[in-house]
Image (spheres, rainbow, N blue to C red):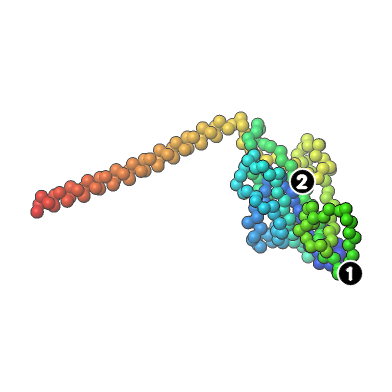
Amino acid sequence: LRISGSQKPVDEAACALHAHLTLPRVLFADKYQFDDALFLASKNLSAMHYISPGVDLEAPAYTLPLWGSSLLLELAPPPSGNGEWTAEVPLHLRYLAPSTGGLQEVHLPTPVLFWACTADEGSKFTVNPFERVDLGYEGLFGPRTMFYHLDPEPALEPGASGIPAGGEKDVGRLVNALQVPVLDSQKSAYVELGTAAVVVAGFTWVCWCLWRVWRAAGYTRRMEEKGVVGKKKTQ
């Protein structure tokens, strides 16, 4: 995330900068990574406040029925309010179905960045009886929270913000198009043959080791029996 500044919208109020990510099921965040304070500090992150429950960290994308997951992070802006700064959000790619060419395009919506500030005690909020509330990330905050959203800048030309050259269809959209590696279906036969050969070789080696142990144990037992018989004859 590239952010132009870190100046709070309201100086008198307690404000915190947040990022809300909507992740398709091909991408996911590992919640255990965000338990390390040093790791968060190295990425200009402060804390993870929410992640969708039940995120499977091992399942391939083509076996999941869910649409994806969401993530709410609190960022750690630098003390100086001027100047551009960045924050990194580590994401992981799931196994995708094989395709021709070994590459597949995935789309990641632009994260929503906003300041969440605590309103003064004397502030009055207008209530609309027809308005539905707590439908999104605002339900994760208290009732006296004011939101100040940062304006995102979409890509203006192909090749910007992760949009590959020739991707004119994504120009101006708040979506990042990424080319990710997958198994090339035209070359999968070599992988299957190589995997089978390794499995057979490993199984043969294990059987050889077991046979050597069995042979050594049998030889030792025969020697012990011969030694016992020899002693009896001597007596």
Q: Quadrant of residue 117?
A: bottom right
Label 1, label 2: how far apart the Cα atoms are: 37 Å
Q: Which residue is mark 1?
A: 122
Quadrant placement of the C terminus: bottom left
Q: Residues within 10 Å of mark 2 (few under 14, many from 20)?
A: some
Residue sitting at 66 percent across and 62 percent down? 37
Q: Toward the viewer: 131 or 8?
A: 131
SS assignment at label 1: loop
Q: Residue at x 29, y 45 (%)?
A: 216
Is any part of residue 150 visible from this angle? no
User: What residue occupies the far front of the structure in this picture?
Assistant: 129
How many residues crowd around disc 1 within 10 Å: few (fewer than 14), some, or many (20 or more)? Answer: few
For the point 15% across and 49% down, the residue is 229
Which residue is disc 2 drawn over? 109
Q: Element type at marker 2?
A: strand
Residue 165 x, y percent position in the rendering: 77, 37
| Residue 160 picture quarter | top right
Q: Is residue 197 above or below residue 226?
A: above
Q: Position of residue 50 (x, y in %)?
A: 71, 57
User: As shown in the figure, which amino acid type bears the numbered disc 1?
Assistant: Gly
Left or right? Give the position of 169 relative to 221: right
